[in-house]
Image (cartoon, helix red, strand yellow):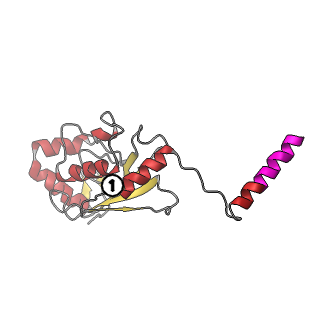
């Protein structure tokens, strides 16, 4: 019983020491590393990062890419990043919110980027991922696809692939699949 009173008195003392303000939330190592990564971001001019949940939730953010070259020039593609508490020992989960006709992004928004899977290392950071995503739009890869149909068209008929990309970005159909406008 005495121990309960000691704990209660200690909590009162702690509250008094913070001048009535709630004690600051202790950051996980992943949050500390992410804070550093964000402070050191060197984004390409085609990329913007936003925090839809506010500055208190740095572990979830969005990255918008507007390619200025290649097949996807003029498009606007939004990716969500969910950074795990074990970051940088585990890679962030990255999904494309924009439905896109792309060999390395499937229709559910899963992204095929080697540094998000088997080639992830703790020395990599958010900046590396952002540059990797930009590279997917300037140099789509038909050798490691998630969207096998798009990859086959890119490999076998690049002109048709370009027309399909333009049709999809304009809000049209490619085959049986409708794509919302993203230009």
Decide whether the magenta segment is chiefly helix, strand or loop.
helix
Which quadrant of the figure has residue 4? top right
**Can you name the residue that lies furthest to the top here?**
118
Q: Which residue is mark 1?
A: 99
Q: Position of residue 64 (x, y in %)?
A: 33, 60
Q: Is residue 8 magenta?
A: yes
Q: Is residue 83 depicted above or below 40 in this figure?
A: above
Nearest the camera: 18 or 126?
Answer: 18
Q: Position of residue 7 (x, y in %)?
A: 80, 46
The residue at 47%/49% (across/down) is: 32
Q: Position of residue 147 (x, y in %)?
A: 27, 43
The residue at 49%/44% (across/down) is: 29
Quadrant of the rendering where the C terminus is positioned: bottom left
**Can you name the residue that lies furthest to the right here?**
1
Tell me: 69 left or right of 47.
left
**Which contiguous range is marked in magenta?**
1-12
């Amino acid at each position: 019983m005495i121990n309960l009173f000691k704990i209660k008195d200690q909590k009162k003392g702690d509250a008094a020491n913070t001048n009535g303000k709630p004690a600051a939330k202790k950051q996980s190592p992943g949050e500390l590393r992410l804070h550093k990564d964000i402070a050191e971001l060197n984004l390409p001019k085609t990329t913007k990062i936003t925090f839809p949940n506010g500055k208190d939730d740095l572990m979830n953010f969005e990255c918008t890419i507007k390619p200025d070259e290649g097949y996807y020039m003029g498009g606007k593609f939004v990716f969500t990043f969910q950074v795990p508490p074990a970051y940088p020992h585990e890679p962030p989960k990255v999904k494309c919110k924009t439905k896109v006709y792309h060999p390395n992004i499937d229709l559910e928004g899963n992204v095929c980027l080697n540094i998000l899977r088997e080639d992830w290392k703790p020395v990599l950071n958010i900046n590396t991922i952002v540059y990797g995503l930009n590279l997917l739009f300037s140099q789509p890869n038909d050798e490691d696809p998630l969207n096998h149909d798009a990859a086959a068209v890119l490999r076998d008929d690049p002109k048709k692939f370009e027309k399909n990309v333009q049709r999809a970005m304009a809000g049209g159909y490619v085959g049986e699949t409708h794509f919302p406008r993203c230009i």
